[in-house]
Amino acid sequence: MTGSGTLADPYVIWDIDDLQDMNLDLTAYYELGQNIDALPARWAWPSQIRRPTADVLTAGTWNVFPLAPATKWDKIDEVVEDGDATYIVGVTGGADADFSFNVFDVPAIAENIGLKLSAFIRNDGSGTSRLRFRITVNGTVYEKAQTGFRFVTYVLHEDVWDTNPDTGLAWTVDDINGVGPNPLERIGVEAYDATPDLRITQFFATALCMGFMPVGQDEPTHNPVNRFSGFFDGKGHVISDLLINRPYLDEGIGLFGCTRQDSTGYIRNVGLQDVDITGESDVGSIVGFHEYMLDLADGIISDCWATGTVRGRDVLIGGFVGYNGGLIQDCRTACEVIVLGVVVLAVQNGGFVGLNDRVIIRSHATGNITVNHQNSNSDIEEIGGFAGYHNNGEIDECFSTGNVLINNNGVAIDIIWAIGGFIGDNWGNGIRNCYSRGNVTVTAGVGIAQGVGGLIGYNEAECVNSYSTGLVTAPGFTHVGGLVGYNDDVVTDSFWDTETSGWAISEGGTGRTTAQMKDPTTFIAAGWDFGAEWGMTPPCNDNYPCLLNVTSGCLWIARSGAGLGALLLLS
């Protein structure tokens, strides 16, 4: 890295090591000097999985396959039929099982290593069970407790040691491979407060390549001084193949983890190509948690884009930013968003932003968002193709084209609510001049199952001059509509395509045929500003209205003497 970090002489970033070293000074001025390959060889090694061997220690009244009698377990319950599953059937609880295992063989060049323990857990009883994952390092046992659960189907539980608990430092290759001075020796599980019907299957350990540490990640102290408050200008350069694999790091996963509230800085002019980002909550590609800015002139994010995949476990997952509390303008994301849904909640997740508390203008999301949930005792709420929950501020001149899929994997979910092609739950100051082209599919729901719409799932604020065209599928739901599912506010001069959506009804807006939706007079008659905000340029946007200030190639030319205006096909 060159430069001194001042406005006149910013730090210039030349490679991934320079980018990582931004954590050493979170208040300085930075710019990219060139395109950056963000996946060096030391982060390119594949994660390794190890399962328990036949050397099994049993304790209490636990029965462990293959040593347990066949009457104590049922092989058809195996999650993956691979012939070597480990089954632990708790018949009284308060017991543990530690396993030897074939040690890892992580390559010598590896850095940023994490250790993840995983198990599928089922509880057929009426009580609530709890579980601890255990490892033994250098003769000492360390534990991570899981929350209470009562699931009648097998549900994945996981936890990660991102440092060696014996030293408090990063895992060394030798230690994770079991040959160092502080070696990993055993892995295990312990049940406590367990009911007689607790079952555990497919217990295994994974050596993770965790990749890049987000700039300004404030876990575990949540100290604002550890958040980014500097000035970053990408100068139009591209960072490619950014890998962040930190599935149990909370609040702030992205190129920038967290920004600081009193920041006068900015993030601008950078592209992220083919990201592979995994976190727990507050996960995005550019920023995980963009703190609430008291002054909208502070912390502006502008002219940035991202492609790739963003994954999160539960809440505030977005293809661009997990939580937004500032001004985002002229940005876009094509990232696929996947919500893993292995815990109780999958809430406030969106193709662009999970939760918006301030202002987003002239931006769009084109990636699909999928919620894969497997817990019956759980909620799926406020999921949208652009924003999961629009809580405050404004969203103006934005669109989404990705599909929204809520997949419950055959499990009956307690609550599925507020699912929309553009916004799951629209609140605060509402939206205007926005549209959604993606399909919305919810596989099934029980209990509270309502509020699914092509544009907005649950509307509690203004919706002005907006439209949707996507197919809406939500069997067994109430309050489902082509534009709005559940409406508790005003929907003004907004439309949906009754043919492509599959719905002739909506609790707000006006339904029109496909031909009418591709006729500019439909919208001009409603007062839409064609020429300043909207255009229509076949074949741009499949002949539906497009946003002049957002979509490249979108045009509108009014011909004099043509009344409401006429479209010219340009060659």
Image: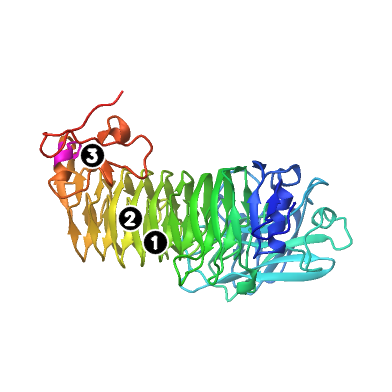
**Rendered image: mark on residue 500:** 3
Relative to residue 421, is residue 76 drawn left or right? right
The region drawn magenta spans 516-521
- Image point 23% across, 61% down: which residue? 486
- Dot 3 amino acid type: Thr
Q: Secondary structure at mark 1?
A: strand
Relative to residue 317, is residue 131 drawn left or right? right
State yes or no: discs 1 and 3 in contact (Cβ < 8 Å).
no
| Dot 1 alpha-carbon crowd within 10 angstroms: few under 14, some 14 to 19, many 20 or more | some
| Dot 2 alpha-carbon crowd within 10 angstroms: few under 14, some 14 to 19, many 20 or more | some
Whole-angstrom CA distance, mark 3 to mark 2, is 24 Å
- Image point 67% across, 61% down: which residue? 6
- Image point 31% across, 33% down: which residue? 540
Taken as a whole, is the magenta stretch helix, strand or loop? helix
**Front-most of 260 and 33?**
33
Q: Secondary structure at mark 3?
A: helix
Residue 210 vertical position relative to residue 535 in the rendered view, above or below: below
Label 3 vs 2, first from the N-terminus: 2
Residue 402 vertical position relative to residue 430 in the rendered view, above or below: above
| Dot 3 alpha-carbon crowd within 10 angstroms: few under 14, some 14 to 19, many 20 or more | some
**Rendered image: mark on residue 396:** 2
- Dot 2 amino acid type: Asp
User: Can residue 545 be seen in this snapshot?
Assistant: yes
Q: Residue 332 at x, y = what percent?
A: 45, 47
Where the C terminus falls, by quadrant? Answer: top left
512 inside magenta stretch: no
Q: Which residue is mark 1?
A: 359
Q: Residue 100 at x, y = what percent?
A: 77, 57
**Rendered image: mark on residue 441:** none
